[in-house]
Image (spheres, rainbow, N blue to C red):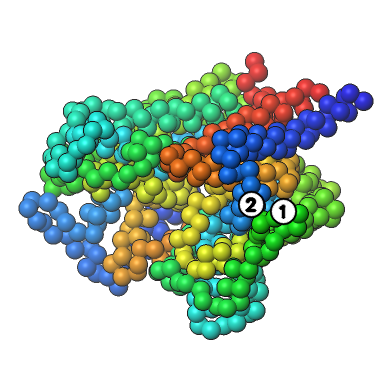
Amino acid sequence: MTQRLKLSVLRHGPLLTTITIFLMAYIIGSQLYPAMQRPQAFFNLFINNGFLLIVGIGMTFVIITGGIDLSVGGVLALTTAASAALLKLGVSAAVVIPLMLVMGTAIGLGLGSIIHFFKVQPFIVTLMGLFFARGLAYIISLTSVTITDPFYKYLALTPIHIPFFAKAYVYIPTLVGPLLLLVAIYLAYFTRFGRIMYAIGNNEQSAGLMGFPVGRTKIMVYAFSGFCSALAGIVFSISLLAGYGQFATGVELDVIAAVVMGGTLLTGGVGNVIGTLFGILIEGTIISILQYNGTLSSWWTRICVGMLTLIFIGIQSIFARRKKDL
Amino acid sequence: MNHKAFFNRIRESRLFWVLTAWSVILGFNALFIPEFFRIAIQDGHLYGNLIDVLNNGAPLMLVAIGMTLVIATGGIDLSVGAVMAISAAMGAVLINPAPTDKLVSNEILTRNATNTPLGIIVLATLAAGMLCGLWNGLLVSRAKIQPLVATLILMVAGRGIAQLITNGQIITIYYTPYFWFGNGYILGLPVSIYIVAAVAIMAWVGVRKTPIGLFIEAVGINPKATYYSGISAKNIQLLAYTFSGFCSALAGLILSSYVHSADGNNNGLNYELDAILAVVMGGTMLSGGRFSLLASVIGAMVIWTFTLSMYALGVPANALLAGRAVLVLLVILLYSDRRLMKRRSKSADNQNKSDVITPDEKLDLPRP
């Protein structure tokens, strides 16, 4: 019994640590700055980091299969630029949104196919995807394009009040991230696709020998990540009501850091999307504490995120070592 | 028969593909932008696009030299751009003629003067870069963190550190002797080229005239076997990362002296990506093993030749990214040639080990 308990603590240890650290950071923050005690401050984390959560879900899947996707920021920026340009031409939002999702999925599919069929390292291929997507975004427009479409404006400016919390609200696009999280949990734990994904991450060769469709699953994972990036791009363009190739620079690193903080091993095979949610919440909390403080400068965010990543890798390796001893 | 063997030797050579790529781009230029090759002499200095390739490409060449050694050990260094920013920030802060926080007028700040002697500035920037490299090396070799992640930490935090050093400001440099590294000329050629040549020769002597090069390749091909044959794989990795930090610091020095400023956010932006591209173009496998310094340097030159030819054609700098992506795609397709596939499958189990080392496996290594 104790052995089983120990094992389950070790298995969920990184996730529990992440949740604890998030709670501690939030409680310390709200003690320092009472404004953070308002429920709205908590929901603001979701409003401000909704797009990060969406990208993070796709990234978690890719990392679980042992790969990495650096193209997310590029696809996100390309989506914002392309949708802004199309909306400016008078194309209906009902056409633009599905088109963008198809485009993102297609880019992911292409990158995944190159990774699988040409056996090139994911790192290099998705790096190319990043350059390519950002370059295309700049070709579409060298400056920021504002969106004046009424449907986008409606989505961006309609608050949804949260039950049980007076005066707390979120916007419609904010709900996309949590809904996608539920879908991702279903995909990861209750479908064949999810199990094959973990199997590939643990050992690609044995997964192939067991008869799993390794290539198809890998390509699908990258396509899903491309889809998530495009979705995040739509959410991002709705929240800013603009499209620009320079949006979300460096977002890939923030997302990877959040995924690592969430307990997903970069070597693949271990990890979950719930951890990623908390990783992103930790980053969001740090940013809001820095904002409430006002005297600390923005670069501390980067240093903090770097330090936290290091701490979490340390925690991961401790748990991995313990698990081996058992 | 003899011809066939000769051609095979050329095809096997690491330099073949990168030189092919370069000659394709130069051939294109010869047909469509002949003025690309014009070289003029002004005030005893050589001017022209080809000289610009050497001068603007110098920082990338330096970074690529360091990156080659790191990649040859089976690692990767993503922090090079951030280290460039840190060393540039270090130099700018030491020059700053008004070091104290008291109110200073603009005249004092824009004076052609320095707070620290030039020699100490250079030493301090190099020391800062080597310290960063040492930190990466310690994380990778002693703490056994995957290189991708270990250097990612400094890549994220490094730009923050650079901004911390400059207090978040873009520091413009007015001290003229500092500009010599990026804008000076010796015998008509830019100073930066001599620096690259000196570092390249130093590295070449270091790796080819001593056993270090062999050790680096051994660590890249099979760290376990290297450990059992009595070579300290840890120290070899540490050396490679420290050297990469040194190269990046030198690159940051040249770059900040060329643009006359230090900007924590934009110094060395995307250099990590370009350097990896240069190394891969030079035929060094990302999984480690055999490497060629010369091929990486030529790879960096190919990137800058391509960039400057696009500028000459009037392509905007930002849109060029897509073009560079197509270039990478071409390189990838060239390298996924069947010959390489064969070689890869031959060393498949080695590769799997060095590609993806799980923490559990890594913990096995240092146990004597």
Mark number displayed over residue A40: 2
Q: Are marks 2 and 1 in contact (CB under 8 Å)?
A: yes
The amino acid on which the numbered mark 1 sits, given as a three-letter code, is Phe
Q: Is residue A108 above or below residue B127?
A: below
> Callout 2: few (<14), some (14-19), or many (20+) C-alpha neighbours within 10 Å?
some
User: Percent position (x, y) of residue A60?
Assistant: 68, 49
Q: Which mark is residue B189?
A: none
Q: Nearer the viewer, residue B345 or A203?
A: A203
Residue B286 in picture, x, y percent from top left: 53, 44
At x 17% / y 41%, what residue is drawn?
Answer: B105
- Image location of residue B323, percent across then percent down: 43, 65
The image position of residue A287, as x and y in percent, is: 53, 44
* Disc 1 secondary structure class: loop
Horizontal arrangement in the rendering, residue A325 relative to residue B164 (left or right): right
Judged left or right of residue B244, residue A228 is right
Q: Earlier in the sequence, mark 2 or mark 1?
A: 2
| Residue closer to the observer: B260 or A25 | A25
Question: In the image, what residue occupies the spot 51% across and 43% down?
Answer: A292
Q: Quadrant of residue A21?
A: top right
> What's the amino acid at mark 2?
Gln
Q: Are marks 2 and 1 on the same chain?
A: yes
Question: Mark 1 belongs to which subunit?
Answer: A
Q: Who's the residue at 38% across and 40% down the image?
A: B163
Q: Quadrant of residue A265?
A: top right
| Relative to B5, B344 lies left or right | right
Q: Which residue in the protein does label 1 denote?
A: A165
**Image quadrant containing the C terminus of chain A:** top right
How far apart are labels 2 and 1 at the CA level?
9 Å
